[in-house]
Image: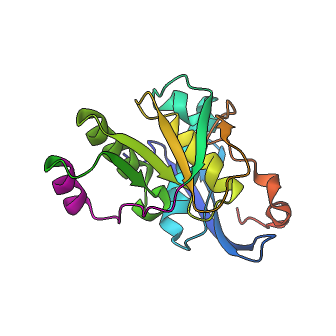
C-alpha cells in the first residue's frame, strides 16, 4: 500500500538533531508539486521516503493521515513508559505467534517495520484477532511520538498506546488535524536550514 501518488522527485538529507543524534530526513515532491516530508532515526532511508510520500498525499488532498486512511476520531493517544521489547520485524514469526495465541498486545516499532503498509497490515491482523496494539517511539524523540500518534489514529482500535523507553514528557498526545502526517518539523532547529534539491 505505497502512497498512491506520482512522485516527481525524492531527496534524502542527513540531519544532526539538537541532541547530537543523526536523522535522515526525506522530501518527496509529487507530480502536482506538493511536497511531503519524512524522517527516521534508525538511518533506513526507505522509512523516511515512505513517510514523506504519505505526507505528500495527505497534503495534496488537504487531510490528516488518519482521515486519509479512514481511521478513528480519537483526538488523544496515551503515551507510557514500557521496557518490554518491541516485536522484531519478521512477519512470518509474528503471524505464527498471533495464530498460536502467544500474544495479547502487539508492541510494534513502525520505524523497524519499514512502511506504513506493514503497520496497517499488522494492525488489521491484530484487530481480527482481538489483540491490542502499541506503537514504539524507540528514541522518544518528539517527531517519533507525533508520527506514532498519527499512525495510532489510523488504527481501527478502541485503545492505542505509544510506548517510549524513557519517562514520557507527556501522558497523552493530541492527534494532529493538519494535512499530512502532522509532524512539527521546526522542533529541530536544523530542519529549516536544509537545502533541498529540486
> Does the magenta-highlighted stretch encompass residue 93?
yes
| Residue for point 69% across, 33% down | 178
Query: Which quadrant does the C terminus fall into?
Result: bottom right
Residues 33 and 72: in front is 72
Quarter of image, res 124: top left
| Residue for point 84% across, 60% down | 192
Residues 172 and 177: in front is 172
Residue 167 percent coordinates (x, y): 67, 57
| Residue for point 58% across, 48% down | 80
Residues 166 and 68: in front is 166
Q: Residue 162, relative to residue 178: is it above or below?
A: below
Residue 180 percent coordinates (x, y): 62, 39
Direction left: furthest residue: 100
How many numbered discs, if any?
Answer: 0
Q: Is residue 189 left or right of residue 82?
A: right
Report the magenta residues as a range.
Answer: 82-98
Residue 181 percent coordinates (x, y): 61, 42
The answer to whether residue 25 is visible is: yes
How is this picture coloured?
rainbow
| Residue for point 64% across, 29% down | 62
Q: Is residue 104 left or right of residue 189?
A: left
Quarter of image, res 1: top left
Amino acid at each position: 500500500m505505497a502512497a498512491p501518488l506520482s512522485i516527481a522527485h525524492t531527496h534524502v538529507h542527513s540531519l544532526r538533531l539538537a541532541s547530537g543524534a543523526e536523522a535522515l530526513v526525506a522530501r518527496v515532491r509529487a507530480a502536482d508539486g506538493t511536497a511531503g516530508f519524512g524522517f527516521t532515526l534508525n538511518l533506513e532511508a526507505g522509512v523516511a521516503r515512505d513517510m514523506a510520500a504519505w505526507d505528500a498525499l495527505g497534503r495534496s488532498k488537504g487531510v490528516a493521515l488518519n482521515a486519509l486512511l479512514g481511521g478513528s476520531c480519537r483526538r488523544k493517544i496515551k503515551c507510557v513508559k514500557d521496557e518490554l521489547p518491541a516485536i522484531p520485524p519478521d512477519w512470518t514469526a509474528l503471524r505464527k505467534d498471533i495464530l498460536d495465541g502467544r500474544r495479547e498486545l502487539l508492541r510494534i516499532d513502525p520505524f523497524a517495520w519499514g512502511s506504513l503498509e506493514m503497520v496497517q497490515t499488522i494492525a488489521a491482523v491484530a484487530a481480527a484477532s482481538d489483540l491490542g496494539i502499541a506503537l514504539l517511539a524507540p528514541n522518544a524523540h518528539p517527531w517519533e511520538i507525533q508520527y506514532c500518534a498519527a499512525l495510532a489514529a489510523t488504527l481501527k482500535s478502541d485503545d492505542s498506546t505509544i510506548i517510549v523507553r524513557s519517562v514520557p514528557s507527556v501522558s497523552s498526545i493530541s492527534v494532529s488535524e493538519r494535512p499530512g502526517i502532522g509532524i512539527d518539523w521546526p522542533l529541530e532547529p536544523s530542519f529549516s536550514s536544509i537545502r533541498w534539491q529540486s
